[in-house]
Every structure is written in structure tokens, then in C-alpha cells.
Image (cartoon, rainbow, N blue to C red):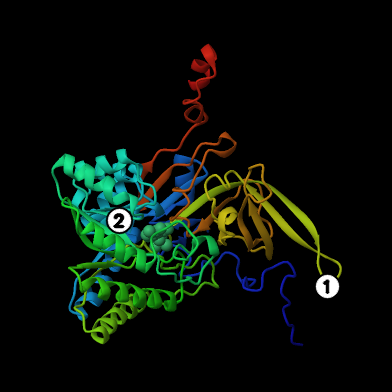
Amino acid sequence: MIVIATAHPLSPPWRKEPLDPNALHAGVWPHSAARNSDGELVFGGVSVSSLVQEYGTPLYVMDKDELVDRALRVKEMVESACKAQGTTGKVYYATKSFVSGHVVSWLSQQGLGFDVASGGELAIALAGGADPGTLEFQGNNKSAEELLVAMKAGIGCIVMDAPIEAARIQAIAEELGITQPVMVRVNTGVHADTHDYLATAREDQKFGLSPAESIELVEHVRTLPNLKFVGLHSHIGSQIFAAEGFLESATRMMATYAALLQTGEVEVLNLGGGFGIAYTESDDPQDLATLVGRIVDHVGHEAKTRAVPMPALAFEPGRIISGPPGVTLYTVGVTKPVSVSVPEGGSATRLYVSVDGGMSDNARPALYGAHYSTRIASRESSAAPALVRVVGKHCESGDIVVDADFLPGDVAPGDVIAVAATGAYCYSLSSNYNAMGRPPVVAVSDSSHELMVAGESIADVMARDQGFGSKSEGAHA
Ligand SMILES: Cc1ncc(COP(=O)(O)O)c(C=O)c1O
């Protein structure tokens, strides 16, 4: 008799029930993820039990070797694709995806530059030992104070987002007696194939200037004595799989570049970041070297067609470097089967698995409806798969960590679960919602672990609150 497995009625169509709910899908989990002879997960040669014993949960775990390797590979891909087109290519790691002193030191050793988007990210990059000349400062509202600090430090480049910035940067540069390299951010109007809120190069949004406005601003910048216009910048969005948006945006950038070449020099085109990664087994990002090669070759083709010199190129990826090497560990506190009516009639059960973190350590599901993948990390189980929703402990029904995945049906309080691909935009978007401390971040490599960022205790969370009077000493102890 042939038994046809029917999909769980509450499972989204893209989430396939696994034959083995202990198995790790390659491409979603860090390369070093494996199960040891006790069945527990090991990352970078370090078992989950030893990590939890040392640091507790929730815990961000970063596979250092994979992070560094990804950074180096992206840099090499960009350099070799650009070399093939007779130009140079640089990579600025987008610190907004995840940054700490260790990250800056590891990636600057690999020769990457850094894209910083605030005075805080700038301070971390500088304190982490980045060469200021390898930094570029982005943002639609850089304060005068931030600009001053950046320019005093000798920042490599400031990406201007609005005409009003020209006079501000000129005044500071004049006062410091320097010539400041600047770029202009172009809103190419391309709708990237991604979630609405992640698409940053649409018409009606806050970043950049239209090509026509950009040309006007560049012409003005060229007249300012203390500014040196070095090139154009664009970033069309994040978590993008399809090449088409990148290619169309590059075409429009090349048109603007060609127009500006008629009146002066334009050295660099920075084409931004945004390369997508696999969060679930249904995500199928194309080979990055191929994608980068296509974009660079496309620029080469455009240069030939327009009979203009090939510009130097730059990219500023974040997630593709820091996302896949990260996982988050949580302890299960409560499990609860919830019976849900289904459109076909009757009901089906979804097992809610409540963990000791949530939207304060991973805001992406609540912000973007992002999907993640999970496994029991502390043991293997032979129980049949159950459709689960991993939820946090915050006071929001949207406090979802993994909206739909299959775990062994005997998942229970005390189990440690791991959520994959949380290296980017989780720690960096974390908050103290419900007065919870942010989890620590630990690096694993070569069977050892190292604290990257300490976690916050409740006392840490309370420490800035001035309203406890004399009771505060006890509370902060
Ligand atoms: C201007 C800019 N550059 C680079 C990035 C990095 O994007 P990703 O991490 O998707 O590569 C972002 C992300 O928001 C961005 O806004």
C-alpha cells in the first residue's frame, strides 16, 4: 500500500515536514554545526551544554571561523570579479548587521573596510582598531557632532544623503583644515524583490536622492573647496535573492555616472549590500560569486556601451557575512498544544514552545514577518515531528521567534533549542523590552569559546534609572 503523506494543515506550504526533525539543513546552519555522540549540537567544536553551563540562555553564538571566512571570501569574490573587468573592488562590512570589538579586529585583519551608520558604530569601529581611512559613514541624519568626530578621526568617506549636508560637512572640513572625501547616495528607484520595509531604493522613502537631484548635488559639491567628490552610492534593499534588481539599479547608476563624467571625475560606484541568505530550507540564494560576477560584468558591459571608463566598485554587505555563522540558544520553559480550526473543517494542533527570550533578542519576525529554523540542541529525539511555533516571553502575541517548523514532538521544558542564522540584525536590533537584559554574545572556534559581548543583568537594565532613591543600591547589587 502506498501511503501519501499529507501536509500538516497549519504548516505553510514552503515548510516541509522533515523525515528527521533532528537533521540540520546544510546552508541554514553554520558549517561547523553537528551532533556529538550524545546527540547534542556542537558549534565550532563546542557543545551546547558547555556553552549553556558557562553563559546560560538566551545566548547568541557566533562561529568565528565561518564569519571570518565569509568576509574573506566575499572580499576575494569582489576583487576577482572587478579584476576581470579591469578595475578594483572594495568591501565595506555593514556594521549595522552585527558589530563588536572582536568583529572589527577580525575583519580589518582580512582587509575589509566598514560601513558605519551612527556615532556608536563609528566609535566601535575606531575602538576596535579599524583604520579610519577604511570607514565610510552613512545615514540620512548624521548629527554635527557625529560628523565632527568622524572627520577628526580621518574617516575615509562620508556618504551624503541630502543637499543640506553639503554645507555642514564643508563647514566642519574648513574648520579642521581638511579635504573630506564624500559620496552621494542615489535612490535609483529600483524596487528590490524583498519585503517592503527592507527595500530602501524606492521613490517614496527617506534614503538618497533621485538621479537628477544627485547630479545637481554633485555639481554643487564640486564647487566646495573642502569637499572632494569621489563617487556615487546606492543600496536597493536587504535579503535579496534575484539578480534583476541589482542589475537594473547598476544600469541606472551607470547612467548617472556617465552624465557626471561629462563635467568632472567620478572614481567609485558603491553598489551597496543586500545579498540574501537562507533562513529556512526553502530559501535558495544563488551562488554569491556568480551573483557578484554578474553585477560587476553588467557594469563592465554598461561602461562599454556608454563608452565610459570602468569605475572602481565597492559593495557593503552585512547579512551575507554575519548572518549564517550565528545561532541563538534558548531554554524551553513552557509547551502548550493549541487546537486551531482549519478551513477544510475540523481542527489541527500547533505546539507552542515558549522560550526564555523572544522579540527583545530577535525583532525580525515581528518587524518583517521573518522566518527562522529551529532544532532541539541539547539532545536528539526519536519522537515524531510536531509542528511548533517558538514564541518568546514578551507581552505581545506577535512575539514569535520561529513561526513554523517541525521539532520532535516530545520537546519539553528544560530542552535547549537553537535557532539558525541569527548572526545578523538580531543582537544589533535587540532591546530591553519588558526590562529584560540583552543576552551575551560568545564566539566559538577550534573547540574553545570566548565572550564577545557581556550580557545584561536586571541590575544593568535598572542602572540608568534614577528613580529608585536609596533603594537603588540594593537593586543594583
Ligand atoms: C546603506 C546600507 N548598506 C548596506 C546594508 C547592508 O545590507 P545587508 O546586511 O542586507 O547586506 C544596509 C542594510 O540595511 C544599508 O542600509
Whether residue 325 is visible here, answered yes or no, is no
**Mark 2 lies within 8 Å of ligand 1 (Cβ measured):** yes
Front residue of this view, candidates 119 and 283: 119
Per the image, the residue denoted by label 2 is 159
- Please tell me whether residue 123 is drawn above or below residue 103 in the rendered image: above
Question: Residue flagged by tag 2: what amino acid is it?
Answer: Val
Left or right side of 124 for 336: right
Residue 324: image location, x then y, percent: 43, 62
Q: Position of residue 213 (x, y in %)?
A: 35, 63
From the viewer's perspective, is the residue at label 1 or at label 2 nearer? 2
C-alpha separation, residue under disc 1 versus residue under disc 2: 54 Å
Q: Is 327 or 235 nearer to us in this picture?
A: 235
Q: Residue at x 58, y 47 (%)?
A: 358
Marks 1/2 in contact by CB < 8 Å: the verdict is: no
Quadrant including the N terminus: bottom right
Which residue lies most toward the right here? 346
Q: Which mark is residue 344?
A: 1
What x and y, as percent, mark residue 475? 53, 20
